[in-house]
Image (spheres, rainbow, N blue to C red):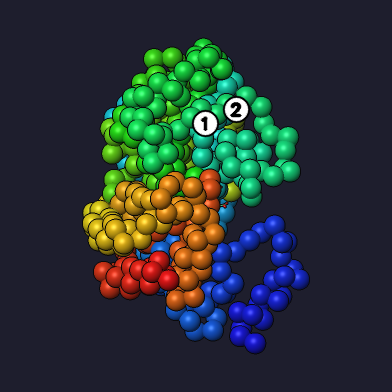
Amino acid sequence: MSLSEDLHKRRLAAVARGVGSVVNSYIDSAGGATLTDVDGREWIDFASGIAVTSVGNAAPRVVQAVRDQVERFTHTCFMVAPYESYVAVCEQLIALTPGTFEKRAALFNSGAEAVENAVKIARHATGRQAVVVFDHAYHGRTNLTMALTAKNMPYKHRFGPFAPEVYRAPMSYPLRDGGLDGAEAARRAIDVIEKQVGAGNVAAVLIEPIQGEGGFVVPAPGFLPAVAAWSSANGAVFVADEIQTGFARTGHWFAGEHEGLEPDLVTTAKGMGGGLPIAGVVGRADLMDAVHAGGLGGTYGGNPVACAAALAAIETMRELDLVAAARHIEAVLVPALRTLASSAPEVAEVRGRGAMIAIEIVEPGGLTPDPVRTAAINKACHDAGLLTLTCGTYGNVLRFLPPLVISDEDLQRGIDILARAIRG
Ligand code: PLZ
Protein backbone atom coordinates (compact mmCIF):
# COMPACT_ATOMS: atom_id res chain seq x y z
CA MET A 1 0.00 0.00 0.00
CA SER A 2 1.33 3.45 -0.89
CA LEU A 3 1.70 6.02 1.88
CA SER A 4 -1.16 8.03 0.36
CA GLU A 5 -3.40 4.96 0.35
CA ASP A 6 -2.53 4.37 3.95
CA LEU A 7 -3.32 7.96 4.88
CA HIS A 8 -6.52 7.78 2.93
CA LYS A 9 -7.63 4.81 4.99
CA ARG A 10 -6.97 6.77 8.17
CA ARG A 11 -8.78 9.74 6.72
CA LEU A 12 -11.92 7.76 5.94
CA ALA A 13 -12.10 6.68 9.57
CA ALA A 14 -11.44 10.14 10.98
CA VAL A 15 -12.50 12.91 8.60
CA ALA A 16 -16.16 13.60 7.98
CA ARG A 17 -17.32 12.41 4.57
CA GLY A 18 -18.81 15.81 3.81
CA VAL A 19 -15.31 17.25 3.45
CA GLY A 20 -14.10 16.21 0.00
CA SER A 21 -10.74 16.28 -1.77
CA VAL A 22 -10.06 16.53 -5.48
CA VAL A 23 -7.25 13.97 -5.37
CA ASN A 24 -6.32 11.24 -2.91
CA SER A 25 -2.61 12.00 -2.94
CA TYR A 26 -1.47 13.42 0.37
CA ILE A 27 0.99 16.28 0.08
CA ASP A 28 4.32 16.26 1.80
CA SER A 29 5.91 19.44 0.46
CA ALA A 30 5.40 22.10 -2.15
CA GLY A 31 7.25 25.01 -3.70
CA GLY A 32 6.55 27.38 -6.57
CA ALA A 33 4.16 25.58 -8.91
CA THR A 34 4.81 21.98 -7.90
CA LEU A 35 3.54 19.75 -5.11
CA THR A 36 5.22 16.55 -3.94
CA ASP A 37 3.12 13.87 -2.32
CA VAL A 38 4.11 11.51 0.47
CA ASP A 39 5.05 8.84 -2.07
CA GLY A 40 7.48 11.21 -3.79
CA ARG A 41 5.24 11.83 -6.80
CA GLU A 42 5.46 15.31 -8.24
CA TRP A 43 2.44 17.30 -9.37
CA ILE A 44 2.33 20.36 -11.59
CA ASP A 45 -0.02 22.78 -9.92
CA PHE A 46 -2.76 24.29 -12.09
CA ALA A 47 -4.99 24.83 -9.03
CA SER A 48 -3.04 26.98 -6.54
CA GLY A 49 -5.23 25.58 -3.77
CA ILE A 50 -8.19 27.26 -5.54
CA ALA A 51 -6.50 30.51 -6.54
CA VAL A 52 -4.63 31.04 -3.30
CA THR A 53 -0.92 30.44 -3.84
CA SER A 54 -0.53 33.10 -6.52
CA VAL A 55 2.95 33.93 -5.22
CA GLY A 56 3.82 30.23 -5.30
CA ASN A 57 3.60 27.63 -2.62
CA ALA A 58 5.82 28.27 0.39
CA ALA A 59 6.99 31.50 -1.26
CA PRO A 60 10.33 32.47 0.31
CA ARG A 61 9.28 35.96 1.44
CA VAL A 62 6.04 34.62 2.94
CA VAL A 63 7.86 31.82 4.76
CA GLN A 64 10.38 34.25 6.21
CA ALA A 65 7.76 36.78 7.27
CA VAL A 66 5.68 34.09 8.98
CA ARG A 67 8.75 32.71 10.76
CA ASP A 68 9.72 36.15 11.99
CA GLN A 69 6.20 36.93 13.15
CA VAL A 70 5.53 33.67 15.04
CA GLU A 71 8.70 34.28 17.00
CA ARG A 72 7.61 37.81 17.94
CA PHE A 73 3.99 37.05 18.86
CA THR A 74 1.28 34.80 17.46
CA HIS A 75 -1.94 36.44 18.59
CA THR A 76 -3.25 39.26 20.68
CA CYS A 77 -6.62 39.77 18.96
CA PHE A 78 -6.72 43.10 17.13
CA MET A 79 -9.91 43.96 19.07
CA VAL A 80 -8.00 43.53 22.34
CA ALA A 81 -4.48 44.79 21.70
CA PRO A 82 -3.76 46.08 18.18
CA TYR A 83 -0.54 45.83 16.14
CA GLU A 84 0.97 47.54 13.11
CA SER A 85 0.70 44.81 10.48
CA TYR A 86 -3.13 44.86 10.55
CA VAL A 87 -3.06 48.58 9.79
CA ALA A 88 -0.46 48.03 7.07
CA VAL A 89 -2.60 45.37 5.34
CA CYS A 90 -5.59 47.75 5.40
CA GLU A 91 -3.37 50.46 3.88
CA GLN A 92 -2.40 48.06 1.11
CA LEU A 93 -6.03 47.16 0.43
CA ILE A 94 -6.87 50.85 0.21
CA ALA A 95 -3.94 51.59 -2.11
CA LEU A 96 -4.42 48.61 -4.43
CA THR A 97 -8.18 48.53 -4.97
CA PRO A 98 -9.61 50.78 -7.68
CA GLY A 99 -11.04 54.18 -6.78
CA THR A 100 -9.24 57.20 -5.37
CA PHE A 101 -12.06 58.11 -2.96
CA GLU A 102 -11.47 57.85 0.76
CA LYS A 103 -11.56 54.25 1.93
CA ARG A 104 -11.41 52.10 5.05
CA ALA A 105 -10.80 48.37 5.41
CA ALA A 106 -11.37 45.56 7.90
CA LEU A 107 -9.84 42.09 8.06
CA PHE A 108 -11.39 38.66 8.51
CA ASN A 109 -10.41 34.99 8.19
CA SER A 110 -12.14 33.61 5.12
CA GLY A 111 -13.81 34.69 1.95
CA ALA A 112 -17.25 33.80 3.25
CA GLU A 113 -16.66 35.91 6.34
CA ALA A 114 -15.61 38.88 4.19
CA VAL A 115 -18.78 38.55 2.11
CA GLU A 116 -20.93 38.30 5.25
CA ASN A 117 -19.35 41.48 6.55
CA ALA A 118 -19.75 43.34 3.27
CA VAL A 119 -23.47 42.56 3.47
CA LYS A 120 -23.60 43.66 7.11
CA ILE A 121 -21.92 46.96 6.21
CA ALA A 122 -24.13 47.58 3.17
CA ARG A 123 -27.30 46.88 5.16
CA HIS A 124 -26.21 49.00 8.07
CA ALA A 125 -25.13 51.92 5.89
CA THR A 126 -28.25 51.94 3.68
CA GLY A 127 -30.87 50.87 6.21
CA ARG A 128 -32.12 48.47 3.50
CA GLN A 129 -32.21 44.68 3.51
CA ALA A 130 -32.31 43.14 0.04
CA VAL A 131 -29.16 41.67 -1.45
CA VAL A 132 -29.04 41.01 -5.18
CA VAL A 133 -26.81 38.21 -6.46
CA PHE A 134 -26.59 36.48 -9.83
CA ASP A 135 -27.11 33.14 -11.49
CA HIS A 136 -24.03 30.87 -11.16
CA ALA A 137 -22.69 32.98 -8.27
CA TYR A 138 -20.50 31.52 -5.56
CA HIS A 139 -19.94 33.46 -2.35
CA GLY A 140 -19.31 30.83 0.33
CA ARG A 141 -20.70 28.10 2.56
CA THR A 142 -21.89 29.88 5.72
CA ASN A 143 -25.63 30.33 6.11
CA LEU A 144 -25.87 33.77 4.54
CA THR A 145 -23.30 32.99 1.87
CA MET A 146 -25.04 29.69 1.01
CA ALA A 147 -28.11 31.79 0.33
CA LEU A 148 -25.98 34.02 -1.91
CA THR A 149 -24.46 31.04 -3.73
CA ALA A 150 -26.50 29.76 -6.67
CA LYS A 151 -25.73 26.06 -6.97
CA ASN A 152 -27.63 23.47 -4.96
CA MET A 153 -25.25 20.49 -5.15
CA PRO A 154 -22.97 20.24 -3.29
CA TYR A 155 -23.20 23.59 -1.54
CA LYS A 156 -26.80 23.96 -0.35
CA HIS A 157 -28.54 20.63 -0.58
CA ARG A 158 -30.56 19.99 2.60
CA PHE A 159 -28.68 22.74 4.47
CA GLY A 160 -31.57 25.20 4.53
CA PRO A 161 -33.43 27.21 5.57
CA PHE A 162 -31.31 29.95 4.13
CA ALA A 163 -30.99 33.59 5.09
CA PRO A 164 -33.82 35.75 3.75
CA GLU A 165 -33.80 38.88 1.58
CA VAL A 166 -31.52 37.40 -1.07
CA TYR A 167 -32.64 37.82 -4.70
CA ARG A 168 -31.11 36.33 -7.81
CA ALA A 169 -30.80 38.15 -11.11
CA PRO A 170 -29.76 36.71 -14.49
CA MET A 171 -26.04 36.84 -15.22
CA SER A 172 -24.37 37.73 -18.49
CA TYR A 173 -23.01 34.39 -19.73
CA PRO A 174 -22.02 35.07 -23.34
CA LEU A 175 -21.70 31.43 -24.45
CA ARG A 176 -25.23 30.65 -23.24
CA ASP A 177 -26.94 34.01 -23.75
CA GLY A 178 -27.93 33.62 -27.38
CA GLY A 179 -26.15 36.76 -28.50
CA LEU A 180 -27.22 39.22 -25.76
CA ASP A 181 -24.61 41.93 -25.45
CA GLY A 182 -23.50 43.42 -22.15
CA ALA A 183 -26.00 46.28 -22.19
CA GLU A 184 -28.89 43.95 -23.04
CA ALA A 185 -27.88 41.44 -20.35
CA ALA A 186 -27.68 44.30 -17.84
CA ARG A 187 -31.14 45.51 -18.82
CA ARG A 188 -32.46 41.97 -18.33
CA ALA A 189 -30.92 41.82 -14.85
CA ILE A 190 -32.02 45.32 -13.88
CA ASP A 191 -35.57 44.55 -15.01
CA VAL A 192 -35.66 41.57 -12.62
CA ILE A 193 -34.29 43.70 -9.80
CA GLU A 194 -36.72 46.56 -10.36
CA LYS A 195 -39.78 44.35 -10.83
CA GLN A 196 -39.08 41.65 -8.25
CA VAL A 197 -37.16 43.49 -5.54
CA GLY A 198 -37.77 47.20 -6.01
CA ALA A 199 -34.90 49.62 -6.54
CA GLY A 200 -35.44 51.32 -3.19
CA ASN A 201 -35.14 48.07 -1.25
CA VAL A 202 -31.71 47.04 -2.49
CA ALA A 203 -28.93 47.29 0.10
CA ALA A 204 -26.28 45.63 -2.05
CA VAL A 205 -25.66 44.28 -5.52
CA LEU A 206 -22.99 41.63 -5.07
CA ILE A 207 -21.13 40.18 -8.03
CA GLU A 208 -17.93 38.35 -8.97
CA PRO A 209 -16.39 40.34 -11.88
CA ILE A 210 -15.44 36.95 -13.33
CA GLN A 211 -17.38 34.10 -11.76
CA GLY A 212 -15.16 31.47 -10.15
CA GLU A 213 -16.89 28.31 -8.97
CA GLY A 214 -19.77 29.16 -11.31
CA GLY A 215 -17.66 28.42 -14.38
CA PHE A 216 -15.13 31.20 -15.02
CA VAL A 217 -17.91 33.16 -16.65
CA VAL A 218 -16.62 36.44 -18.07
CA PRO A 219 -19.64 38.72 -18.54
CA ALA A 220 -20.10 40.48 -21.88
CA PRO A 221 -18.32 43.86 -22.04
CA GLY A 222 -20.48 46.61 -20.61
CA PHE A 223 -22.52 44.36 -18.31
CA LEU A 224 -20.60 45.12 -15.12
CA PRO A 225 -20.36 48.90 -15.67
CA ALA A 226 -24.10 49.06 -16.40
CA VAL A 227 -25.01 47.12 -13.26
CA ALA A 228 -22.61 49.27 -11.22
CA ALA A 229 -24.08 52.47 -12.67
CA TRP A 230 -27.62 51.29 -11.86
CA SER A 231 -26.54 50.51 -8.28
CA SER A 232 -25.04 53.92 -7.80
CA ALA A 233 -28.04 55.69 -9.34
CA ASN A 234 -30.38 53.80 -7.01
CA GLY A 235 -28.50 54.07 -3.73
CA ALA A 236 -27.50 50.39 -3.63
CA VAL A 237 -23.99 49.43 -2.56
CA PHE A 238 -22.12 47.81 -5.46
CA VAL A 239 -19.93 45.05 -4.00
CA ALA A 240 -17.32 43.30 -6.14
CA ASP A 241 -16.46 39.86 -4.78
CA GLU A 242 -12.80 39.69 -5.84
CA ILE A 243 -11.99 36.77 -3.57
CA GLN A 244 -11.01 34.50 -6.45
CA THR A 245 -10.16 37.16 -9.05
CA GLY A 246 -8.21 39.59 -6.90
CA PHE A 247 -4.54 40.21 -6.27
CA ALA A 248 -3.06 40.02 -9.77
CA ARG A 249 -4.79 36.77 -10.75
CA THR A 250 -6.47 38.14 -13.89
CA GLY A 251 -3.70 40.43 -15.12
CA HIS A 252 -4.80 43.43 -13.11
CA TRP A 253 -4.63 43.85 -9.35
CA PHE A 254 -8.42 43.44 -9.39
CA ALA A 255 -10.55 41.99 -12.18
CA GLY A 256 -13.00 44.90 -12.13
CA GLU A 257 -10.22 47.07 -13.53
CA HIS A 258 -10.58 45.37 -16.92
CA GLU A 259 -13.82 47.32 -17.19
CA GLY A 260 -12.91 50.37 -15.16
CA LEU A 261 -15.08 49.45 -12.16
CA GLU A 262 -14.73 51.38 -8.93
CA PRO A 263 -16.85 49.26 -6.59
CA ASP A 264 -18.22 50.76 -3.40
CA LEU A 265 -16.94 47.72 -1.51
CA VAL A 266 -14.51 44.95 -2.51
CA THR A 267 -14.17 41.60 -0.78
CA THR A 268 -10.75 39.92 -0.90
CA ALA A 269 -9.20 36.70 0.42
CA LYS A 270 -7.36 33.77 -1.19
CA GLY A 271 -4.33 35.19 -3.07
CA MET A 272 -3.80 38.06 -0.66
CA GLY A 273 -2.51 35.81 2.12
CA GLY A 274 0.08 33.80 0.19
CA GLY A 275 -1.49 30.62 1.66
CA LEU A 276 -2.42 31.86 5.13
CA PRO A 277 -6.07 32.48 5.97
CA ILE A 278 -6.90 36.16 5.71
CA ALA A 279 -9.67 38.15 4.07
CA GLY A 280 -10.71 41.76 3.80
CA VAL A 281 -13.50 44.18 3.05
CA VAL A 282 -12.37 47.51 1.66
CA GLY A 283 -14.30 50.40 0.28
CA ARG A 284 -15.92 53.78 0.66
CA ALA A 285 -15.13 55.33 4.02
CA ASP A 286 -18.67 56.65 4.51
CA LEU A 287 -20.08 53.12 4.18
CA MET A 288 -17.38 51.33 6.15
CA ASP A 289 -17.45 53.93 8.93
CA ALA A 290 -21.25 53.96 9.14
CA VAL A 291 -21.03 50.91 11.39
CA HIS A 292 -20.88 51.66 15.12
CA ALA A 293 -17.61 51.00 16.96
CA GLY A 294 -17.44 47.31 17.90
CA GLY A 295 -19.96 46.29 15.22
CA LEU A 296 -17.36 44.45 13.12
CA GLY A 297 -14.75 41.96 14.22
CA GLY A 298 -13.94 38.43 15.32
CA THR A 299 -11.28 36.76 17.44
CA TYR A 300 -8.83 35.95 14.67
CA GLY A 301 -9.61 38.51 11.96
CA GLY A 302 -6.31 39.91 10.71
CA ASN A 303 -4.26 37.58 12.86
CA PRO A 304 -0.65 38.87 13.02
CA VAL A 305 0.84 35.80 11.34
CA ALA A 306 -1.67 36.04 8.50
CA CYS A 307 -1.03 39.80 8.21
CA ALA A 308 2.71 39.22 7.98
CA ALA A 309 2.08 36.67 5.24
CA ALA A 310 -0.23 39.06 3.38
CA LEU A 311 2.29 41.90 3.47
CA ALA A 312 4.99 39.55 2.19
CA ALA A 313 2.71 38.18 -0.52
CA ILE A 314 1.80 41.68 -1.72
CA GLU A 315 5.47 42.68 -1.71
CA THR A 316 6.26 39.57 -3.78
CA MET A 317 3.52 40.45 -6.26
CA ARG A 318 5.03 43.89 -6.69
CA GLU A 319 8.65 42.77 -6.78
CA LEU A 320 8.07 39.98 -9.31
CA ASP A 321 5.42 41.98 -11.21
CA LEU A 322 2.90 39.16 -10.98
CA VAL A 323 0.29 41.29 -12.76
CA ALA A 324 2.51 41.00 -15.84
CA ALA A 325 3.14 37.33 -15.05
CA ALA A 326 -0.61 36.65 -15.12
CA ARG A 327 -0.83 38.30 -18.55
CA HIS A 328 2.10 36.23 -19.75
CA ILE A 329 0.35 33.04 -18.60
CA GLU A 330 -2.74 34.08 -20.56
CA ALA A 331 -0.59 34.79 -23.62
CA VAL A 332 0.86 31.27 -23.48
CA LEU A 333 -2.15 29.30 -22.28
CA VAL A 334 -4.97 30.76 -24.36
CA PRO A 335 -3.43 30.25 -27.84
CA ALA A 336 -2.41 26.72 -26.84
CA LEU A 337 -5.95 25.97 -25.69
CA ARG A 338 -7.46 27.53 -28.80
CA THR A 339 -5.26 25.32 -30.98
CA LEU A 340 -6.41 22.31 -28.97
CA ALA A 341 -10.04 23.42 -29.23
CA SER A 342 -9.85 23.73 -33.02
CA SER A 343 -9.54 19.95 -33.29
CA ALA A 344 -11.68 19.10 -30.23
CA PRO A 345 -15.37 19.77 -30.99
CA GLU A 346 -16.26 19.13 -27.35
CA VAL A 347 -14.44 22.33 -26.33
CA ALA A 348 -17.17 24.95 -26.76
CA GLU A 349 -15.16 27.89 -25.50
CA VAL A 350 -11.79 28.97 -24.17
CA ARG A 351 -12.29 31.90 -21.80
CA GLY A 352 -10.95 33.81 -18.84
CA ARG A 353 -8.37 36.45 -18.12
CA GLY A 354 -4.78 36.29 -16.98
CA ALA A 355 -4.06 33.12 -15.03
CA MET A 356 -7.77 32.40 -14.59
CA ILE A 357 -8.54 30.45 -17.76
CA ALA A 358 -11.04 27.71 -18.50
CA ILE A 359 -12.49 25.52 -21.21
CA GLU A 360 -16.16 24.61 -21.31
CA ILE A 361 -16.91 21.02 -22.40
CA VAL A 362 -20.11 20.16 -24.27
CA GLU A 363 -21.56 17.43 -26.42
CA PRO A 364 -20.22 18.17 -29.92
CA GLY A 365 -22.65 19.95 -32.20
CA GLY A 366 -24.54 21.89 -29.52
CA LEU A 367 -24.20 23.41 -26.08
CA THR A 368 -25.39 20.50 -23.94
CA PRO A 369 -22.97 20.37 -21.00
CA ASP A 370 -20.86 17.23 -20.73
CA PRO A 371 -19.82 16.88 -17.08
CA VAL A 372 -18.88 13.22 -17.59
CA ARG A 373 -16.29 13.98 -20.24
CA THR A 374 -15.11 16.94 -18.18
CA ALA A 375 -14.52 14.68 -15.19
CA ALA A 376 -12.73 12.15 -17.42
CA ILE A 377 -10.34 14.80 -18.80
CA ASN A 378 -9.76 16.10 -15.27
CA LYS A 379 -8.94 12.60 -14.05
CA ALA A 380 -6.62 11.94 -17.01
CA CYS A 381 -4.73 15.11 -16.05
CA HIS A 382 -4.45 13.91 -12.47
CA ASP A 383 -3.25 10.46 -13.57
CA ALA A 384 -0.51 12.20 -15.54
CA GLY A 385 0.53 14.46 -12.63
CA LEU A 386 -1.26 17.70 -13.48
CA LEU A 387 -3.48 19.10 -10.75
CA THR A 388 -6.52 20.62 -12.46
CA LEU A 389 -9.98 21.54 -11.15
CA THR A 390 -13.45 21.58 -12.60
CA CYS A 391 -16.18 24.14 -11.92
CA GLY A 392 -19.41 25.44 -13.37
CA THR A 393 -23.09 25.17 -12.63
CA TYR A 394 -23.18 22.18 -14.97
CA GLY A 395 -19.85 20.73 -13.78
CA ASN A 396 -18.54 20.99 -17.34
CA VAL A 397 -15.81 23.58 -17.04
CA LEU A 398 -12.16 22.67 -16.64
CA ARG A 399 -10.30 25.56 -15.04
CA PHE A 400 -6.65 26.48 -14.86
CA LEU A 401 -5.29 28.55 -11.99
CA PRO A 402 -1.53 28.12 -11.93
CA PRO A 403 0.55 30.02 -9.40
CA LEU A 404 1.59 33.26 -11.09
CA VAL A 405 5.24 32.33 -10.52
CA ILE A 406 4.98 29.16 -12.62
CA SER A 407 7.97 28.70 -14.96
CA ASP A 408 7.42 28.54 -18.72
CA GLU A 409 8.72 24.99 -18.56
CA ASP A 410 6.14 23.84 -15.99
CA LEU A 411 3.41 25.71 -17.82
CA GLN A 412 4.32 23.91 -21.04
CA ARG A 413 4.52 20.53 -19.27
CA GLY A 414 1.03 21.17 -17.96
CA ILE A 415 -0.30 22.13 -21.39
CA ASP A 416 1.23 18.97 -22.91
CA ILE A 417 -0.48 16.78 -20.29
CA LEU A 418 -3.75 18.56 -20.86
CA ALA A 419 -3.47 18.13 -24.63
CA ARG A 420 -2.97 14.38 -24.22
CA ALA A 421 -5.89 14.23 -21.76
CA ILE A 422 -8.23 15.99 -24.19
CA ARG A 423 -7.13 13.94 -27.20
CA GLY A 424 -7.80 10.83 -25.09
N1 PLZ B 1 -16.32 34.28 -3.01
C1 PLZ B 1 -15.76 34.44 -5.39
O1 PLZ B 1 -14.40 31.99 -4.99
C2 PLZ B 1 -14.24 30.61 -2.48
C3 PLZ B 1 -14.61 27.59 -2.62
C4 PLZ B 1 -14.29 26.17 -2.58
P1 PLZ B 1 -13.86 30.98 1.48
N2 PLZ B 1 -14.09 29.75 -3.60
C5 PLZ B 1 -13.62 28.40 -3.36
C6 PLZ B 1 -15.30 25.35 -1.85
O2 PLZ B 1 -15.80 24.42 -2.46
O3 PLZ B 1 -15.56 25.64 -0.67
C7 PLZ B 1 -14.95 31.91 -2.67
C8 PLZ B 1 -15.00 32.53 -3.93
C9 PLZ B 1 -15.71 33.74 -4.06
C10 PLZ B 1 -16.28 33.70 -1.81
C11 PLZ B 1 -15.60 32.52 -1.59
C12 PLZ B 1 -15.57 31.94 -0.21
O4 PLZ B 1 -14.28 31.96 0.29
O5 PLZ B 1 -12.50 31.47 1.88
O6 PLZ B 1 -13.85 29.59 0.90
O7 PLZ B 1 -14.87 31.14 2.55
Residue designated by label 2? 166
Q: CA distance from mark 2 to mark 1?
A: 7 Å
The answer to whether the residue labelled 2 contacts the one labelled 1, judged by CB atoms less than 8 Å apart, is yes
Amino acid type of the residue that numbered disc 2 sits on in the rendered structure: Val
Describe the element under mark 1 as helix, strand or loop: strand
Q: Residue at x 33, y 30 (%)?
A: 181
Q: Quadrant of residue 57?
A: bottom left
Report if residue 159 is visible in the image.
yes
Q: Which mark is residue 333?
A: none
Q: Residue at x 30, y 52 (%)?
A: 354
- Toward the right, the furthest residue is 13
Pinpoint residue 92: horizontal percent, then vertical percent: 35, 43
Pinpoint residue 159: horizontal percent, then vertical percent: 72, 42
Q: Residue at x 51, y 39 (%)?
A: 137
Pinpoint residue 192: horizontal percent, then vertical percent: 50, 20
Residue designated by label 1? 133
Describe the element under mark 2 as helix, strand or loop: strand
Q: Residue at x 53, y 48 (%)?
A: 394
Above-or-below relation of 292 to 25: above
Crowd class of label 2 (few under 14; some 14 to 19; many from 20; radius 10 Å): some
- Toward the front, the furthest residue is 365
